[in-house]
Image: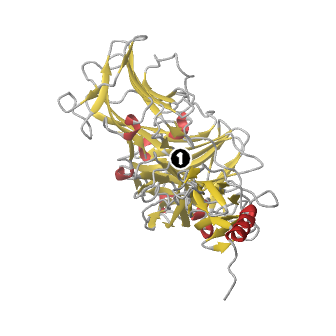
Amino acid sequence: MPIMKSNQSQAAIIGGVLFLCLCLIITPAIAKNGSPKVAAPAGQQNVKGAGPITTQPADRTVMVGDTAVFSVVAFGNNSSGHLTYQWRKDGVNLVGKTSHSLFVINAQESDEGIYSVRVGNGALFVTSKDATLIVNYPPVNNAPTLDVIPDMEIAQDSGVQSINLTGISAGPNENQTISISAESSNPSLIPTPTVSYDSPDSSGILTFAPNYGVSGTATISVTVQDNGGTDFGGQNTVTREFNVFVSPAPEIVWLDDSNSPSFQTAGFRFRTFGNGSWLTGWIWSTNGNPAPYSGVEAHGSTHDQLHQHWFGDSADTLPVATNEHLFAYVYLDPVNTPSEIMIQWQTTDRSFEHRAYWGADLVTQWGTDNTASRRRMGDLPPAGQWVRLQIPASLVGLEGTSVSGMAFTTYGGKSTWDRIGKNGTLNPPEAEIVWLEDSDSASYQNAGYHFTLFGVNPWQGGWPWLDSNWDPAPYSGAEAHGSSHPQLHQHWFGDSTHTLPVFTNDILFAYVYLDPVNTPSEIMIQWQTPDRSFEHRAYWGADLIQGWGTNNTASRRRMGDLPPAGQWVKLQVPASSVGLEGAEISGIAFTTYGGRSTWDRAGKK
């Protein structure tokens, strides 16, 4: 039979094994049989011989790209004097991860899982509790939105176009700040469009104007951008494109070549050099420099002072209707450029008191500046190329008349002219862009300030809105606005974030009603630009408001006599006359000297 080991030998073997075990920090207790008992502190994990883990690895949730740290604290030692560690992910050992802490650097979705660590002393080990790593991604920026913009076809020289942009947002469940920009693929046809938009509105206005005398196709790109960035696959822009087809304008040509009926049936035709030397005849050129713009002939003159060629009393008259525009093509010599050019129209009553000029105001012996008898239309056109000049008939007093003659007047230099007539498709009444109508107008609602000024010094806040219970009733909409005082008085607002862009050849307008019993001596409109300047003024009547600007400059331009009292009248001011071409309008003042004025419906066309 086998020989049993004594109890003493068994005790020696057990003691040898325990000598290799971790030295535990324990609280001794006495068991019922009188032997010692090891008790682990609450929350600690204890495996016989390997010691307790006093701090377990904790769950971690980090953003993608951050570092996640798992740590464990255990007590004990082995014959080498330290513990060993092996970290695992989803039960698989991680190579080289043998420290008491595990660093998961630049955490990605692939690092998500269950982490644990095995703590050992060379012979025995204890395994920690599981800890979960979750890697979160930031919310992805959804793409902003903008409704599709349909293609459009317009006539050449059809003026300013306004398109409503709809469906604007930063994207589903997004609330970022939005900005909108626009570009033209063909700036020579359509210069860069302008967008009027206030974030976070769901709509805005795109405005553009084709260059005069040009036809063709341009693609306009409208881009909505939010400030949400593009990290982690986000999208912060959306672009909509649409095509604009500009068809040639249906010009009504009245004078082109020497065989034109308007010229052939004229009662007289002359040419003058200098200030007093008259010659009969007309200079037609077929192959000169420049070549004719159209047809087979052009006509022109040259002199170092005032010179012109003209005809009148034609039996082949040109009737001019309301809202029609007159045009003429001109070529200025780039080497011998004039200082001023002028067109004069004769009506069937033999009056030439209908003039438009470009450049310096040197031909002053005819008409009154900035009235229908001598209206400034802006700077000289570019030299060395054919340019189409266009004049609203209303500005030179020709609506409802018939033209029977014309004069082509030049001060110094050489000018050549061709292809004259009218175009009835420009800027019809429905093309008005109304910027201020009633108290709910965006221009007024988004103004930084609005005041009423009575007299010279006293200021009052507010704005004198007048509904249909007042006399006169509003011209349009639900409200008009006005003021009354024996001296200087005005109402105005400024710093509006809903600006009105102004393009080349734009016409500014406002409707006014002057009290026939208490008629003012002068009325004035002042426009503010975003630089907070009000140095853009037009006035009618006496020049009594002299504290602002310089007379007959863009800062204070006289537009003629007071309009008739007792009726609504549409005032029109070429943007070029008050220095606003290419600018934006952020405020407006309606100024009156004495009497009572009522205003309504202001904007551009």
Residue farthest toward the left in the current orientation of the protein: 469
Q: Is residue 28 left or right of residue 528?
A: right
Is residue 396 visible in the rendered structure shown here? no
Q: Are there few (<14), some (14-19), or many (20+) residues within 10 Å of tag 1?
A: many
Front in this rendered view, residue 310 or 2: 2
Front in this rendered view, residue 537 or 566: 537
Task: Check the image and report above or below for 436 versus 137.
Answer: above
Is residue 327 visible in the rendered structure shown here? yes
Q: What residue is drawn where x is 34% and y is 23%? A: 462
* Residue 230 position in % (x across, y down): 59, 59
* Residue 392 position in % (x across, y down): 45, 47
Image quadrant assignment for residue 472: top left
Location of mark 1 (residue): 503
* Residue 353 position in % (x across, y down): 47, 38
- Which residue type carries mark 1? Phe
Task: Check the image and report above or below for 393 versus 220.
Answer: above
Image quadrant assignment for residue 566: top left
Residue farthest toward the right in the current orientation of the protein: 80
Task: Check the image and report above or below for 102 versus 432.
Answer: below
Front in this rendered view, residue 324 or 285: 324
- Disc 1 element: loop
Task: Check the image and report above or below for 596 versus 17.
Answer: above
* Residue 337 position in % (x across, y down): 72, 45
Q: What residue is drawn where x is 43% and y is 51%? A: 204
Quadrant of the frame with the N terminus: bottom right
Q: What residue is drawn where x is 72% and y is 70%? A: 9
Front in this rendered view, residue 320 or 296: 320
Report the coloring of the rendering. secondary structure
